[in-house]
Image: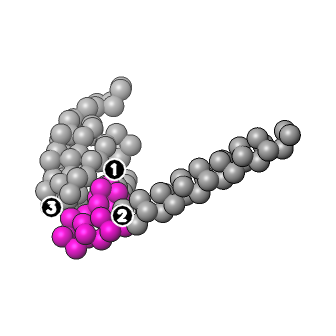
């Protein structure tokens, strides 16, 4: 007698799981169609845009790090669609121009905004 309700319950659970799985596949197909429509229209998906921005930020930062006289640890780089913003501190006025020139020389950089400030190291001259 107890097996009949248990069998009904298990059939109901299986039916619900099958329905959820079928619905999930349908939504994935719709998402793929939407993604291909976005690609056809020329718009980059948000994930690809974020990845491109991160890659550009890393390239600019790597270019700055190559110069040992610049303390790159005190400089932050923000990249958005080719526009790069530099923020932080340097120890000499001439380094502001140097860091800006380095950022402009990186492939993919469209514009550079510098918010760098001069700050002498503690105990420095």
Label 1 secondary element: loop
Question: Which residue is tagged 3?
Answer: 110
Dot placed on the residue nearer the N-terminal end, 3 or 2: 2
- The quadrant the N terminus occupies is top right
Dot placed on the residue nearer the N-terminal end, 3 or 1: 1
- Which residues fall within the magenta stretch? 32-53
The reply, left or right, for residue 123 in relation to residue 12 is: left
Q: What is the spatial separation of the Cα atoms under label 3 and label 1, in whole angstroms? A: 25 Å
Label 3 secondary element: loop
Mark number, residue 6? none
Q: Main secondary structure of the magenta part?
A: helix
Residue 123 in percent (x, y) is at 36, 26
Instruction: Determine which quarter of the picture holds residue 102.
Output: bottom left
Question: Which residue is tagged 2?
Answer: 30
Q: Tell me the residue at 40%/66% (across/down).
A: 29
Dot placed on the residue nearer the N-terminal end, 2 or 1: 2
Which marked residue is nearer to the observer: mark 2 or mark 1?
Answer: 2
Q: Tell me the residue at 18%/70% (across/down).
A: 41
Q: Residues within 10 Å of mark 2 (few under 14, many from 20)?
A: few
Q: What is the spatial separation of the Cα atoms under label 3 and label 2, in whole angstroms? A: 35 Å
Q: Residues within 10 Å of mark 1 (few under 14, many from 20)?
A: few
Question: Which residue is tagged 1?
Answer: 69
């Amino acid at each position: 007698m107890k097996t009949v309700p248990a069998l009904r319950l298990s059939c109901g659970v299986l039916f619900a799981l099958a329905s959820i799985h079928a619905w999930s596949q349908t939504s994935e197909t719709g998402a793929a169609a939407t993604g291909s429509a976005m690609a056809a229209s020329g718009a980059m998906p948000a994930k690809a845009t974020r990845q491109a921005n991160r890659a550009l930020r890393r390239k600019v930062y790597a270019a700055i790090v190559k110069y040992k006289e610049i303390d790159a640890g005190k400089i932050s780089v923000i990249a958005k669609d080719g526009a790069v913003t530099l923020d932080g501190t340097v120890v000499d006025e001439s380094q502001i121009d140097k860091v800006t020139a380095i950022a402009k020389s990186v492939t993919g950089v469209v514009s550079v905004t510098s918010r760098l400030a001069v700050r002498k190291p503690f105990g420095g001259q």
